[in-house]
Image (spheres, rainbow, N blue to C red):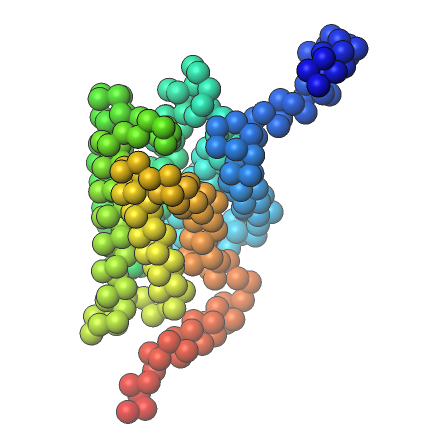
Amino acid sequence: MQALNSITDSQLPQNPNNSSSSVNGLYGWLGECHGFWHNLALIIPSFIFVLFLAFQAKRSYRKLSNGRSYIMISYYGCLWLVSLLNLAWCSLQAWECTPGKEMAWNILSLFTTSGMLFLEVSLVAFLLQGNYASGLEALTRTFAVSGLIVGLDLLLKAIYLFGFGVPVFIDNIEHSHQVKWGLWVVHRLVLTAVYGFILFMYHSKWRERLPARPAFYKYVTIMFILNALALLACGLTGNGSNFGFWLYSVTTVCYHAFYLPLLYITFLADFFQEEDLNLENVYYSEMKDAGFFDADWE
């Protein structure tokens, strides 16, 4: 078989730009590091979402200009920036295993994860402000708190990464790094606790302090389950479990491939609907289905 390959290769024209080299290069780029299907599962959803944002850009800009909502304008701008960063991160998975690309991969991963965390924390901050979250004051308060938390998280990761040489963004089951997985355990534990607290609020007497939209409840439930699974995966991987590493990879793919579309559906999609009357009917129907008007009949 090797002899046949040698003969075949010798018959090809010695042109570095031939189609065979291009195909092999493309397959090698997609198959490097974590494997073909892993990389494809990251690239396709993130690319489709950026394409969706591009197709909707003109209508979204018109809606934002007419609505003049500081919160929506800021979130939409942040979503665009983070989506492009995430697409680059998903498309450049080969950098993680390429000698000489470690620094570039670490910087890209640091800013991508920080950008996604900023959106995640700011949405949680918006949720905890309840029905009073509106206007420029709420935007300033939300972004200030989110920026402080994400800034501290970014600084801590940068110290571990560049100061102590901990491979925070290099995943390798053969060389398990206890400090790295310990850091991720703490990170996921905090997020799981926050989402668990919000779920508790939805089922307690403080329920009316949260926005009266079932879509937010579904979002919190999904993120609680995802972070709980990631927490379990980090704990198992830190102890050398192959299953834990596989589960961690699955949660990473789900987060980078589907979190940004989930955020758009939860927080922005209704705002960009054509008819405001239809939007009000959607809100009323969701509130009625969630039982927020049951007390009026008692």
Residue placed furthest toward the bottom: 298
Residue displayed at 62% across by 26% down: 26
Q: Is residue 190 left or right of residue 135?
A: left
> Along the line of sight, which residue is nearer the eye, 98 or 139?
98
Residue displayed at 56% across by 34% down: 36
Compared with 13, 52 (above or below) is below
Question: From this viewpoint, is residue 23 visible?
Answer: yes
Q: Position of residue 25 (x, y in %)?
A: 62, 22
Q: Position of residue 259 (x, y in %)?
A: 43, 49
Compared with 252, 200 (above or below) is below
Question: From this viewpoint, is residue 47 visible?
Answer: no
Compared with 192, 209 (above or below) is below
Q: Quadrant of residue 50?
A: top right
Q: Position of residue 197 (x, y in %)?
A: 22, 60
Q: Is residue 178 left or right of residue 56?
A: left
Residue displayed at 56% across by 30% down: 31
Q: Position of residue 178 (x, y in %)?
A: 24, 32
Q: Is residue 265 left or right of residue 176?
A: right
Q: Is residue 289 left or right of residue 114?
A: right
Quarter containing the N terminus = top right
